[in-house]
């Protein structure tokens, strides 16, 4: 039998099921003694709970490298020590409740409150209180916790709710997978499973009554499936998937340190996109040949005021230092508005924020903020090969106005005798239909183009990419978007300016041959997709890419194009269905 | 008397456990009462569970209200934690 759930921790695991049943914690027979006695029992149980948890935190710290997992359990101690909540429990005791009943009732109130919260993270925290409550009740009632420390190798844990305290008690090397009825992607159990690299499928309704301890179970954390006592065919498929995943990873790793080029030797620039400075590390580890997009919004987020010129300068310089002075770094100026809000800028609510005062429009409206950023970039440009990229451009005038501002800033900085460079290439994002249609005019004003496929698809197909109801209209492989991309590349080549692509489509295995055939020679992708993109590019030669693309361009709708591309590319990548 | 201030919660995770723990620990040092108001709800600012139950997200505007003998000092400390301690 196969059951579906949420794949919350990727990977494939197999082994024998061990059902962890929740012991019913019945305290109805406990007799109330006296107020002071009940209070004493409550407090000593909480103390014992904290001492146990402290031990778990220490053993967990020894098992994992990151501190985040330990914080979850330390948080449990902080929560139960809340004097306000403790006061509520003591109140119940004063009104004749036993320590157990007081604890269960008050915890129950908070479980309900947390479960009713709007925010998913808070709802998941209700599970933490359930965990706390049952662990303290077990201490009071003298019920032993389930044996989890010595499970044999190859165990698949199946539980109603896999709690954080359970996760920290398992011998993770012996656990092949986790299956639970409760929990989601943001639940603490999911976070811990990912930290330990254990495949997990959560939210599988009624699974504890469908599996028996000892059943052979396959946990497919990648696709969110649980196979119980699979037949030969299912087993076969599983091993194929598992081996393919291992093989794919090995093959991808083989592309580290290699040049990016097509099968027939066309050299491609393969860059990485970063959204925060910490991602520079992943960029280098994954062998990026440059930084095709630095999203500067991160500098403005998680704080209460605009970052100073010095702070911004240091952040840009840090990226250059990390990747090397000889590598290109494309810095995109503040792309704010649309779905991205920053509280302290007090952006006015707009009826249609995607068509409002966003990105370059905002910056040109607030030249003081824009100037600080431009000055910081010009100073950093002294250190390395920086390019400036302007987002959301729809009119040539926006480029001219920015250049004028840069000129006046460089005069100002010369007078101040600040070290800077104004020999910076300035490019524009192509992400509005206006920019596509007037690409020939923009090409005369800028030094390079960068195609942002996410927004370009949204604006070309007039589809809100955050709205699941219209998900079907958000397709890069639509004739309108592909024609737009082709036009932009054609114009760039005619005008002799470089053109790159930095949207998600740049790492899409199905679309890469089409872009190669269009003449795209610069791809900028997420750091984690660099090696796989290099591998995909190397699978294509111009002749084959041209053949497919020629046919794609005669097709009239996205579904037709997608089906055709899937068939053709699967063949090249050796995927048989 | 009563003093109050409206603040914006920064950080990636909003008013998360670690911050709430630190915040309530500090507030406990004052004798005044403290309330946090958000989206029509009001909770005790010395109670970590009450604060967490609100699920205050990053970017939210919250109101802090202090009443008591050391209310001004308390409000000052409360806002400095919210303004500086988010990470």
Image: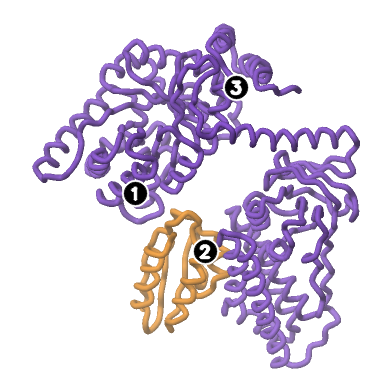
Residue A326 shown left or right of residue A176 in the figure: left
Would residue A59 be found to the left or right of residue A329 on screen?
right
Work out whether disc 2 and disc 1 sit on a shared chain.
no
Quick one: SS at disc 3?
loop
The residue shown at (45%, 75%) is B34
Q: Which of the two labelled residues, at mark 3 and mark 1, occupies the earlier sequence position?
A: 1
Coordinates of residue A548 in the picture (x, y in percent): 59, 10
Residue to which mark 2 is pinned: B41
Above-or-below relation of A462 to A288: above
Q: Which mark is residue A510?
A: 3
Name chain B's colour.
Answer: orange
- Which label is found at residue A248? none
How far is disc 3 from disc 1 in space, using C-alphas?
41 Å
Q: Is residue A304 above or below residue A391?
A: below
Say which quarter of the image contains residue A12: top right
Residue in the image at 33% along x and 26% along y: A428
Q: Nearer the viewer, mark 2 or mark 1?
A: 1
Residue A346 is tagged as 1
């Amino acid at each position: 039998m196969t059951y579906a759930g949420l794949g919350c921790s990727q990977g494939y695991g197999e082994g024998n099921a061990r059902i962890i049943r929740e012991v019913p914690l019945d305290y109805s027979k406990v007799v109330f003694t006296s107020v002071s006695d009940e209070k004493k029992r409550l407090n000593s149980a909480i103390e014992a709970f904290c001492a146990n948890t402290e031990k778990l935190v220490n053993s967990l710290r020894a098992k994992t490298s990151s501190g985040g997992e330990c914080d979850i359990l330390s948080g449990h101690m902080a929560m139960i020590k809340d004097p306000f909540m403790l006061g509520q429990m003591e109140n119940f005791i004063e009104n004749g409740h036993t320590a157990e009943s007081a604890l269960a009732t008050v915890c129950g109130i908070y479980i309900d409150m947390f479960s009713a919260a709007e925010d998913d993270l808070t709802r998941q925290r209700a599970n933490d209180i359930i965990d706390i409550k049952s662990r303290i009740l077990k201490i009071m009632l003298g019920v032993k916790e389930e044996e989890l420390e010595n499970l044999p190798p190859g165990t698949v844990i199946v539980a109603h709710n896999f709690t954080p305290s359970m996760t920290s008690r398992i011998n993770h090397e012996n656990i092949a997978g986790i299956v639970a009825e409760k929990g989601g992607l943001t639940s603490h159990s999911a976070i811990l499973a990912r930290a330990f690299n254990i495949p997990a499928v959560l939210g599988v309704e009624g699974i504890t009554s469908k599996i028996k301890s000892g059943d052979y179970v396959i946990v497919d954390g990648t696709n969110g499936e649980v196979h119980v006592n699979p037949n030969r065919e299912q087993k076969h498929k599983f091993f194929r998937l598992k081996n393919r995943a291992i093989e794919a990873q090995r093959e991808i790793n083989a592309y580290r340190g290699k040049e990016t080029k097509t099968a027939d030797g066309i050299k491609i620039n393969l860059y990485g996109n970063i959204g925060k400075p910490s991602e520079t590390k992943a960029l280098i580890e994954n062998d990026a040949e440059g930084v095709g997009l630095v999203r500067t919004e991160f500098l403005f987020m998680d704080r209460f005021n605009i970052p100073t010129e010095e702070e911004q300068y240091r952040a840009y310089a840090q990226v250059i230092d990390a990747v090397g002075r000889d590598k290109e770094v494309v810095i995109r100026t503040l792309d704010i508005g649309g779905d991205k809000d920053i509280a302290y800028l007090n952006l006015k609510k707009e009826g249609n924020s995607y068509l409002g005062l966003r990105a370059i429009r905002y910056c040109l409206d607030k030249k003081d903020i824009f100037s600080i950023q431009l000055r910081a970039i010009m100073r950093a440009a002294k250190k390395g090969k920086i390019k400036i990229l302007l987002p959301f451009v729809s009119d040539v005038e926006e480029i001219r106005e920015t250049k004028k501002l840069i000129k006046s800033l460089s005069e100002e900085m010369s007078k101040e005798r600040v070290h800077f460079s104004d020999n910076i290439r300035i490019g524009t994002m192509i992400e509005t239909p206006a920019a596509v249609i007037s690409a020939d005019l923009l090409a005369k004003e800028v030094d390079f183009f960068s195609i942002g496929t996410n927004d370009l698809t949204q604006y070309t197909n007039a589809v809100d990419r955050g709205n699941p109801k219209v998900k079907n209209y958000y397709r890069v492989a639509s004739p309108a978007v592909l024609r737009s991309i082709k036009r932009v590349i054609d114009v760039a080549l005619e005008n002799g300016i470089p053109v790159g692509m930095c949207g998600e489509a740049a790492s899409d295995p199905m679309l890469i041959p089409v872009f190669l055939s269009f003449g795209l020679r610069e791809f900028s992708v997420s750091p984690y997709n660099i090696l796989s993109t290099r591998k995909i590019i190397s699978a294509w030669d111009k002749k084959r890419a041209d053949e497919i693309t020629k046919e794609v361009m005669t097709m009239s709708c996205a579904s037709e194009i997608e089906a055709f591309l899937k068939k053709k590319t699967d063949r090249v990548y050796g995927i048989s269905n | 008397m009563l003093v109050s201030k409206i603040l914006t919660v920064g950080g990636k995770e909003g008013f998360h456990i670690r911050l709430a723990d630190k915040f309530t620990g500090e507030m406990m040092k004052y004798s005044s009462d403290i309330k946090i108001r958000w989206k029509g709800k009001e909770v005790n600012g010395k109670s970590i569970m009450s604060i967490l139950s609100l699920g205050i997200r990053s970017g939210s505007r919250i109101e802090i209200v202090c009443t008591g003998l050391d209310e001004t000092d308390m409000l000052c400390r409360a806002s400095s934690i919210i303004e500086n301690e988010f990470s």
